[in-house]
Image (cartoon, rainbow, N blue to C red):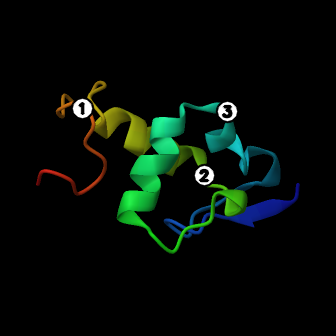
Amino acid sequence: MTTYQCPLCANTVDERLRFLHAETERWLITRIRRQHPEWVAEDGACPRCVEAYRIRRGGSAGKAAGEGPGEGE
């Protein structure tokens, strides 16, 4: 298995998961860039970070819609 280190959290995951964010909604990329302006979409993100942004948008965590990690806190 080839691994990949997430540029957002430094978590090491399977390389095949690198571009998971590209298959999600565009708002997710906007939220990540807001919190990590140095991030380049082509670098990808691990599933853990993608899910964290998705949940904090208003999913099961119950945050207000549109909020990413750290927003509104």
Residue at the disc numbered 1: 61
Q: Are marks 2 and 3 in contact (CB under 8 Å)?
A: no
Q: Which numbered dot is residue 13?
A: none
Relative placement, left or right, of 64 versus 34 is left
Residue at the disc numbered 3: 23
Q: Quadrant of the C terminus?
A: bottom left
**Looking at the image, is mark 3 or mark 1 earlier in the sequence?**
3
Work out which residue is located at the far top of the displayed protein and give it.
60
Residue at 56 percent across and 70 percent down: it is: 10
State whether residue 2 is above or below residue 30.
below
Q: Residues within 10 Å of mark 2 (few under 14, many from 20)?
A: many
Q: Secondary structure at mark 1?
A: loop
Of marks 3 and 1, the one in the foreground: 3
How many discs mark residues in the rendered view?
3
Q: Are marks 3 and 1 in contact (CB under 8 Å)?
A: no
Q: From mark 3 to mark 1, how far is it between C-alphas?
A: 22 Å
Q: Tell me where residue 17 sits by quadrant.
A: top right
Residue at 39 percent across and 43 percent down: it is: 53
**Residue 24 image point, x, y percent:** 59, 32
**Looking at the image, is mark 2 or mark 3 earlier in the sequence?**
3
Relative placement, left or right, of 13 versus 1 is left
Q: Quadrant of the N terminus?
A: bottom right
Residue at 37 percent across and 59 percent down: it is: 34
State whether residue 28 is above or below residue 9.
above
**Looking at the image, is mark 2 or mark 1 earlier in the sequence?**
2
The amino acid on which the numbered mark 2 sits, given as a three-letter code, is Cys
Q: Which numbered dot is residue 46?
A: 2
